[in-house]
Image (cartoon, rainbow, N blue to C red):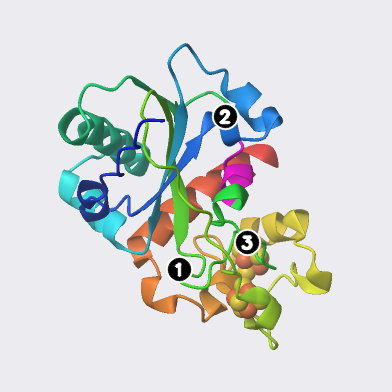
């Protein structure tokens, strides 16, 4: 068997897409691999994510001003990475895009996703301040990434300050109550219209907390979706 190529990460790390995970398609569970509908020659799925503040700094510096500058920037960065760092490969960007991708299922396989009382995964290094940014299927032959293990801080978090910080009481009983959260966020005086009090109360990875403008950007988008839903 020929030797695998090492993954080329420096450009991505500097560009804010500082989490990467390589899956061999042949090693993915069938239900996930089938949904990807691989084409001839495609061998790998590469998951690109970000952790911390660097991505937003890069997005601002890029001058992109569309409706979703983070997606636009992520696509542009992945395209540049393929063109400049690993030329000669065929690839298709599945996410961002219209194709349904089980990002959280992939995140679990990678060891990136760990359930928490809040609605997002929490990681012992990044806290909740990370996200999936792109998923790409390619004809590459990188060494597959090893799954990251034992990264959930929640089981050993005794006081669970996130639960107490939620003004809507939407996290009690260990179950996130989306309806309760959404209705509270829609209230005129809501403290959570443009951010989540519970998420901000989690002490894990707080040094990586997004800057206010990024939080405002993300939560304004989710608030618009909720408004649409409850119209
Ligand atoms: S406050 Fe504790 S339980 Fe809540 S998300 Fe953070 S680590 Fe998990
Ligand atoms: S957004 Fe507000 S209401 Fe919803 S879970 Fe977070 S703290 Fe609770």
Of 216 and 73, nearer the camera is: 73
Is 199 situated above or below 91?
Answer: below
Range covered by the magenta-colored residues: 102-107
Of 227 and 174, nearer the camera is: 174
- Residue that numbered label 1 is attached to: 126
- Residue that numbered label 2 is attached to: 26
- Residue that numbered label 3 is attached to: 114
Displayed quadrant of residue 31: top right
The answer to whether mark 2 and mark 1 are in CB contact below 8 A is no
- Residue in view at x 75 percent, y 62 percent: 176
Mark 3 crowd level (few <14, some 14–19, many ≥20, 10 Å Cα)? some
Mark 2: secondary structure: helix
Of 36 and 130, nearer the camera is: 36
- Residue in view at x 44 percent, y 20 percent: 42
Residue 98 position in % (x across, y down): 52, 23
- Helix, strand or loop: magenta stretch: helix
State how far apart marks 2 and 1 are (Cα).
30 Å
Q: Nearer the viewer, mark 2 or mark 1?
A: 2
Is 63 situated above or below 39?
Answer: below
Quick check: 22 left or right of 147? left
The outermost residue toward the front is 1
């Amino acid at each position: 068997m020929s030797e695998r190529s090492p993954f080329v990460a420096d450009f991505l790390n500097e560009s804010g897409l500082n989490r990467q995970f390589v899956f061999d398609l042949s090693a993915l569970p069938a239900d996930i691999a089938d949904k990807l509908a691989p084409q001839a020659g495609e061998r790998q799925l590469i998951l690109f994510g970000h952790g911390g503040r660097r991505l937003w700094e890069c997005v601002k510096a890029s001058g992109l001003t569309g409706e979703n500058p983070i997606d636009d920037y992520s696509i542009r960065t992945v395209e540049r990475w393929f063109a400049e760092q690993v030329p000669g490969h065929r690839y298709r960007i599945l996410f961002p895009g219209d194709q349904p991708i089980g990002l959280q299922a992939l995140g679990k396989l990678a060891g990136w996703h760990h359930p928490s009382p809040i609605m997002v995964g929490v990681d012992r290094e990044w806290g909740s301040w990370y996200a999936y940014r792109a998923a790409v299927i390619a004809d590459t032959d990188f060494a597959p990434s090893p799954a990251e293990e034992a990264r959930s801080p929640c089981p050993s978090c005794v006081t669970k300050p996130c639960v107490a910080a939620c003004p809507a009481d939407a996290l009690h009983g260990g179950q996130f109550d989306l309806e309760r959260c959404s209705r509270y966020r829609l209230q005129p005086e809501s403290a959570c219209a443009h951010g989540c009090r519970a998420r901000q109360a989690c002490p894990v990875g707080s040094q990586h907390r997004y800057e206010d403008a990024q939080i405002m950007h993300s939560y304004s988008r989710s608030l618009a979706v909720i408004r649409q839903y409850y119209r």
